[in-house]
Amino acid sequence: MNCLKMQPHKKILFSIVLILLSAKIFAGGTISVDARFDSAQILIGDQMYLNMVVTQPVGVKVMFPVFTDSIVSKIEVLSSLPADTTHIDANNIKVTKKYLVTCFDSGLYQTQPLKFAFFNGTTTDTLVSAPIMLAVNTLQVKDPSKIADIKGVIEIPLTLKEILAYTGIGLAILLAILLIAYVIWRWKTHKPILGIFAKPAEPAHVIALRELERIQREKLWQRGFIKEYYSGITDAVRTYIEARFEVPAMESTSEEIISRLKTIDVIEKSLITKLTEMFSLADLVKFAKMEPAPNENENIWAVAYDFVKNTIPVVATEPSVNEKKEEPEGKDVK
């Protein structure tokens, strides 16, 4: 682009006009505006800032030009930064506003003069900046004949490393699904989540004896909780019978329990007789509100305790070496 030559007196006149357009002088101080790009030229697609600066007295309100999508045709606005205020002295400040811009078409562009409206309390007026020039340059191509079309997508076969990675991810997902299904199944069947690490279940007689001893320590019938005392004892015995002899004692009546126990050979008949009396007395207390004598309260606990103690399963053990009898050696008779 060729620059226009001006006579010296015309240059001076043009400078004076620009100063008058971009500054106003008041009794309270001077208002001046300035607008320019970071550089007078950029490469196509590059980004830079449009900087607008207002120097003004403290009490004056100046409105910056507002841009939405472009400064002029082809010069696009990408973003806007908040205004920044700097104090020059006690009476004057400098306010800076920036717009990030770019351009995707080469050429020489000129903006219109930017208008800054202001109000100083008594006067409303407008200041105008000088037009701004911007040259947008394109990239130089040394040999245009070597410019080629964009190549299509090249498909690269999967490597062994990539296949192993995808396989590992698939196996991890499958294992996660199986683990979740296993946890849900264990939870629904009321089993420990980590069954292999679960503590072995205590024998039924250990649980029953511990529960009976707890009931005795609490002295329920001595404190007036007769029904709770009898319910606790019978529940402990029922739970033991169900776990020890596989009889659904918790869901059966007293008569049904006794009837089933009579068919089990390992239980002595005397124990069944005492247990029958215990259940009958407990039913009268729980359902007929009978008030038993103190000796009956003590006896029912003893009957329950003896039943459990005398029906503990016997675990067969191998005889020790010392217990094994030595067989006599045979002698030859001639």
Image (tube, rainbow, N blue to C red):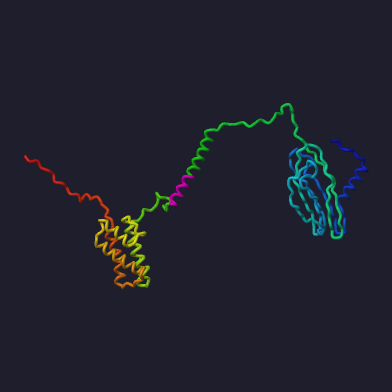
Whether 271 is drawn above or below 72: the answer is below
**Does the image show residue 329?**
yes
What is the span of residues highlighted in magenta in the rendered image? 177-188
Residue visible at 69% across and 29% down in the picture:
149
Please tell me which residue lies in front, 165 or 5.
165
Quadrant placement of the N terminus:
top right
Of residues 67 and 219, the one nearer the viewer is 219
Going by the image, does 161 lie left or right of 247?
Answer: right
**Residue 289 is covered by the magenta coloring:** no
Question: Is residue 179 inside the magenta stretch?
Answer: yes
Residue at image position (90%, 38%) is 5
What x and y, as percent, mark residue 213? 33, 65
Q: Position of residue 11 (x, y in %)?
A: 90, 43
Horizontal side of 155 relative to 219 (left or right) equals right
Relative depth, front residue between 254 and 235? 254
> Which quadrant, please, contains the C terminus?
top left
| Up/down of 27 relative to 46, above or below | below
On the question of residue 218 being in view, the answer is: no
Total tally of numbered discs in the picture: 0
Place residue 13 in its image quadrant. Answer: top right
Image location (x, y in percent) of residue 253:
34, 61
From the top left corner, tell me how far across and down residue 42 is, in percent. Answer: 77, 39
